[in-house]
Image (tube, helix red, strand yellow):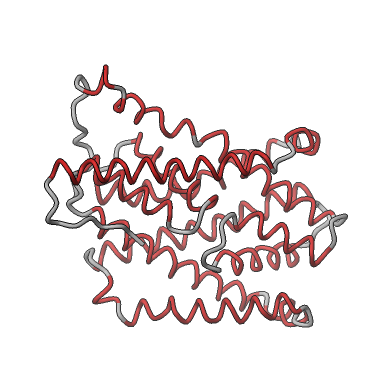
Amino acid sequence: MTVDLPPDQPPALRQRLVRWLSITLSVITLIAIVLAVRGLDFAGLLRSTPGSPLFWTAFIASYLLVPGSEWLIYRKLWHLPPNGLLPLLRKQIANELLLGYSGDAQLYLWARQNAGGTNAAAAVKDVALLSAAAGNIATLAMMAATAPMLWSMMDSGWLRALGISIGLVTLVSLAIFLFRGALFSLPRRQLWGIFAVHLARLFISILLLAVMWHVLVPQATLAWLLLLATIRLMLSRLPLFPNKDALFAGATILALGAGSDTSRAIALVAALTIAAHIALWPLTYLPMLRRWMPSTSRSIPPKAGLEPE
């Protein structure tokens, strides 16, 4: 979902509107972060944090996987420089703490300010649509792989309702392919490349999650870890729900109880993810603050590293 601006506005007015929309979304994200800080027990988090290097390697790689894979995509589309990772981190934080696609709107506004907006809307829209389609395909594949275990759990009312919701969302998303000629703007070869990056990112994410959970709950079997990853993917397909990791942790506690080792492990990973959002979000604005300062705004030349192909 992208937010386009009326094309008949004067350039100066358009630029001011883009800037104020970007600031508004940033303020909303800040409010969400303040609320997340209030609900986070930092002392308890420090006490329960593992010291395993394998866990921290998997956690850092998992956290940076989405912005890193999207940097590869936008590097190809816009010749994105290395510091382009910062707005992609900001996009991830907004998407996870606010409603889905709010981060995509922020990325679009950032691209309009930094690249003239010549293909910002088309690129952000196509990347978001392909991410959703890849997520649904990965979810269906994981559901098929763990079907016997999922079927044995169908007595749980929440899982049956979740399955119905996922089915509806998947049907809608698969319709994307039926109308792909009208929806997508980028060339077909680029679309397939973007889709492949999203699929690879999803399955690497599953592997990294399994590594973290295995470190925290070493007695868990591979089949059990795959089932947890499947349920997490299913929850991630639900629209209009912020903070899917916290939602997954809550669903696990409801199903297994708060005292379960698995529930504690999933809640810990969710809390660490929120803590990472809180710590990194201000850092993503450091380059923008330099440009916004009146004393330096005139001395910094406009960026030219985001030219579309």
Closest to the observer, 20 or 237: 20
Looking at the image, residue 226 sits to the left or right of residue 82; the answer is right
Query: Vertically, is 211 above or below 174?
Result: above
Looking at the image, residue 50 sits to the left or right of residue 297; the answer is right
- Residue farthest to the top? 295
The quadrant where residue 287 appears? top left
Q: Looking at the image, which residue is at 52% across and 67% down?
A: 239
Query: Vertically, is 61 above or below 196?
Result: above
Percent across and percent down for residue 280 are: 52, 35
Percent across and percent down for residue 105 are: 36, 53
Q: Looking at the image, which residue is at 19% across and 49% down?
A: 308
Closest to the observer, 55 or 44: 44
Looking at the image, residue 256 sits to the left or right of residue 296; the answer is right
Q: Quadrant of the N terminus?
A: bottom left
Percent across and percent down for residue 266 are: 73, 53
The quadrant where residue 119 appears? bottom left
Closest to the observer, 177 or 6: 6
Q: Looking at the image, which residue is at 31% across and 63% down?
A: 126
Closest to the observer, 279 or 201: 279
Q: How many marks?
A: 0
Q: Looking at the image, which residue is at 19% across and 31% down?
A: 302
- Residue farthest to the right? 259
